Amino acid sequence: MNPVTTEGPVLSEPEVAAVRRGVPDPGIALPRVAVPTVLLFAANLAVWTLATWLVLGGFGAEWLWLSIPLHTLVSFAMFTVLHESTHHAAGRLTWVNELLGRLSIPFVAAWGSFPMVRYVHIEHHRNTNEDIHTDPDAWTERGPAWQLPLRWLTVDAWYLRFYLPRTRTRPRAEVAEATVMLFTSIAVFATVIATGHLWELAVIYLIPQRIGLGILAWWFDWLPHHDLGVTARTDRFRATRVRVGWERLFTPVMLYQNYHLVHHIHPTIPFYRYIQAWRRTEEDYLDRAVPIATAWGRALSPGEYRAWRGITGSPGGEPPAAGRPRYHRLCVSEVRPLTADSVSITFVVPDDLRETFRFTPGQHVAVRALVDGRELRRTYSLCSAAGSGVLRIAVKRVPGGAFSDHVLRWLRSGDELDVLPPTGRFTVTPRPGTSRHLAAVAAGSGITPVISIVASTLLAEPGSRATLLYANRDRASTMFADELTMLARRFEGRLRIVHFHSRPDGGAEALTPPDVPRYERTVAGHLTPERLAELWPELAGADAWYLCGPERLADRIAGALTERGVPGGDVHRERFTGTAEPGAAVADVVPATVSVTLDGRTTELDVGAGESLLEGALRHRLDAPYSCTGGACGTCRATLLSGTVQMEQNYALGADEVSRGSILTCQSRATSAEVAIDYDR
C-alpha cells in the first residue's frame, strides 16, 4: 500500500487508474478552487460565532434551544468541508485542501488530525462494506438494531481504535501530527474544565458535536451502505446506493449525499455537482443495476426508476406511491391481423415517455380499457426487438374473454389504451461481443416474449445463435409465421426454427423432413420430451433455455431438461396466467381484518373467508394496483407486515422476494384474523 502523504493526490496514480477504469466520464472538471466549499466553510464559521455569542454573551440558558442546534449544524456541515478536502475535491490547489481540512476538523472531532482522518476515510473507500477491521465505517452498520444509535454516536472513538494499531506502518509526520492533536485537545479540555467552564464546553462543543456525529454516521454511513451485501472489491457500482425523490428537501439537508454512490465512483467531483454527474452518466449506472432507493427507503429496480423518472422528471420530486408505476394513455398506431383469432397492436410512444417504456427483451406491459362500462386490465408480453423504438403486443382471442373480444372486434388505429411501463423477470440481457446459444420452446401465444428475446439477442450479439421449437395446430394458427420466416432468412443460419404442427393441413403446407438441413422446418405431431430427444444433438450445450407455453408442456420439457443434466438456473419459464384448477381446495382461510397501506395512507377493512386481499381492497374502493389477477404479472405485489396468508399461485415472485415478505395480493387469502400489508414498500 502506498502511504498517503500531505503532498499531491489522496490516492496513488495506480489507485486512481483503478478507480477510473471502466467508469463513465461525466465530463466534470475539478475547479482550481471549489468556491461553494469555501463559502460553506465561511458560512459555518459565521454560524458558529453567532451560536457561541448566544452562550457567552450573557443571554442566559433560555437561548440554548437555538445555540445547541446551531452548533450541531456547524459540526454536521463542517464535515462536508473536511470530507471534500479529504478527497482533494476542494480544488486543484493542494494547499487549499490542506488548509480547509485542518481548519474544519476541530469543529468535527477536535482530537483528530486531518491526515489521520484522511487515511481512515480512504480505507473506507478502498474496502467498502468489508468487516469492521477493514472498513472503518462498517462500525456504523454492524450489530443489533438497538446498538446502532450507540455506534453512530461513537464513530469517532472507533476511528481512533481503527487507527492506533496501524501507526507502525503510517508516515512519521502523519503519526506525529495525530499525536500532537490528540494530546493538545485533551490539555485544552482539561484546562477549560479546571477553570470552571465545563458547562460552556458542554453546550458549545461536547453536546452539539456528539449529536452532529451521530447524524453524520447515520446519514453518510448507514443510509448509503446498510444491507447491500456487496463490497467495493466485488462490484463498486453496487456497494453504495443513491436515494431519489424529495430532492428539494433532502439534497440541501444532506448536502448532496443522497447521491452518495456518485461520490464513491467519482470521489474527486465536488459535492455540489453529484446530481449533474448522475444525469450525464445515468444510463450507464442503470445498466449496471446500481442500488436505488426512494427518499424513504423503498428499493427501486432500474426499470422502476425509469418509470418514475418518466413521470416526475429526473431527478426531483418523490416517486409516486414510493415508485409504483402509473398508467399512461398511448395511441394505437396499427392493429395488424396475425391469424384468424389474433392481432398485433403497435403503440405510439411520445418522446417524453421513450425512457419510461424502454424495455428488456421478454418483459410485458399491463393494458387497461373501459369495456361496456367495466374497467378491464390484462397483461401482454412485448413482441418487438428491444432498442427498435417499437412498442408492440399481441392479443389472441380467449373464449369468453371480454378484453380480447373487444380488441379483435373494435380496436382500430387512432384509438387509445392505458398502458403501464414494462416489467417482468422472464428476460435476457443482450451483451454485445458475447457468443452463446439460446434455446427456446414456445406454444401458441407463448411466442410473444420469445420472439423479442430471440430477435433482440441475435441483433445485439453477431456471434450468438438460437434454436426455436414452436408448437401450434397448423400454419394458419401460427402467430408471427411470416415474421419468423423473415428472421430465419435474415440471420442466415444463426436462427433455426422447428415448427411442430399437431393438426397439419396437408393441402396447405408441406411438412419438411427433419433430416433436411434448413433454417426453418416443420414436423407433424406434438412437441414432446421424445421429440426433444430426437433434436438433442443440435440442442445439447445450449447456454440458456426459455420456455413459454401451457403449464403442462413447460413442466414436461423442464423435466426432460433436468434429466439431461441441464442446470436449473439455465432454464427460464414464463406463464401468462396462473389459474387454479377447477375445484382446487383453499384450506384454513378465515375472515380477517386487513390493514392496507397504499399511497401513504393506511385503511382497515374486513375481508371475507376465501376472498383475496386484492378483492377486499377493491371492494372497499381502494385503488390497489393489479393487472392479470392470475399471479403471473406481479403488478399487485405488496409486503406482508403481519399476520399470515395463503398464496395459491405465484409465477411472479422469486423465493428471495417471498422470504422478504413479498406477496401477490390477487392470490393471497388470510389465514389469521388480522393481516397488515403495505403496497408502498
Image (tube, rainbow, N blue to C red):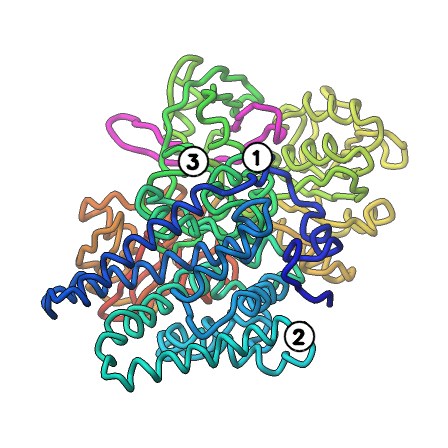
Is there any visible trace of residue 651 in the rendered image?
A: no
Left or right: where 548 falls relative to 618? right
Q: Report if residue 283 is visible in the image.
A: yes
Q: Position of residue 172 (x, y in %)?
A: 66, 75
| Numbered disc in front, either 3 or 1 | 3
Which of marks 2 and 1 precedes in the sequence? Answer: 2
- Quarter location, residue 315: top left
Residue 385 belongs to magenta span: yes
Query: Is 200 placed above or below 562 here?
Result: below
Per the rendering, the mark at residue 314 is 3
Report the mark closest to the observer, 3 or 2: 2
How many labels sit on residues?
3
Kindly identify which residue carries mark 2.
Answer: 172
Amino acid type at mark 1: Ser
> Label 3 sits on what residue type?
Ser
Q: Residues within 10 Å of mark 3 (few under 14, many from 20)?
A: some
Q: Looking at the magenta stretch, what is its main secondary structure?
A: strand
